[in-house]
Image (cartoon, rainbow, N blue to C red):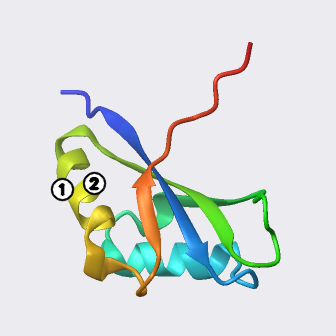
Amino acid sequence: SVSVRRSVDIFVTRLDPETDESAVVSCATDVLQGQYADNVQCIKLQTKHGNSYSSFHVSVLVDAADMKQVLLLLHAADSWPEGVLVRRYFKPKHG
């Protein structure tokens, strides 16, 4: 049978402005307990107030059967540092 892969996309914000992509990838990998470590990608987003916080788009390529479990892990309040806001990421619609 063919395994179906899906992308889990989340929006992470309210991080320190000096935070870089590697720190967010490391945190996401820890949250996922090392599973899918090679499939985590992170992009730093532009913010309205760039000197007060930073925001990221985190994408994890997972097996479709594990998608719900990965979403629950990434959205758990105790998975991220205190004060960090995590939501589903929806790609911007152009045109």
Q: Work out whether residue 12 or residue 52 is closer to the camera in this orientation and state it.
A: 52
Residue 67: image x %, image y %? Answer: 25, 46
Q: Which residue is mark 2?
A: 71
- Relative placement, left or right, of 84 versus 54 is left
Density class for disc 1 (Cα within 10 Å; few <14, some 14-19, many ≥20) is: few
- Relative placement, left or right, of 6 versus 66 is right
Residue 59: image x %, image y %? Answer: 50, 52
Residues at circles 2 and 1 in contact by the CB criterion of under 8 Å: yes
- Disc 2 is placed on an element classified as helix
Q: Which residue is mark 1?
A: 69
Residue at the image point whose x is 82% and y is 77% from the top = 51
Residue type, mark 2 in image: Leu
Quarter holding the C terminus is top right
Residue at the image point whose x is 31% and y is 71% from the top = 32
- Disc 1 is placed on an element classified as helix
Q: Work out whether residue 42 or residue 12 is closer to the camera in this orientation and state it.
A: 12
- Relative placement, left or right, of 95 versus 90 is right
Q: Which quadrant would residue 72 be assigned to in this image?
A: bottom left
Density class for disc 2 (Cα within 10 Å; few <14, some 14-19, many ≥20) is: some
Residue 60: image x %, image y %? Answer: 44, 54
Gap in Å between the C-alphas at discs 2 and 1? 5 Å
Q: Work out whether residue 48 or residue 33 is closer to the camera in this orientation and state it.
A: 48
Residue at the image point whose x is 45% and y is 81% from the top = 83
Could you tell me if residue 33 is visible in this image? no
Residue at the image point whose x is 71% and y is 78% from the top = 20
Q: Which quadrant would residue 13 be assigned to in this image?
A: bottom right
Residue type, mark 1 in image: Gln
- Relative placement, left or right, of 43 versus 57 is right
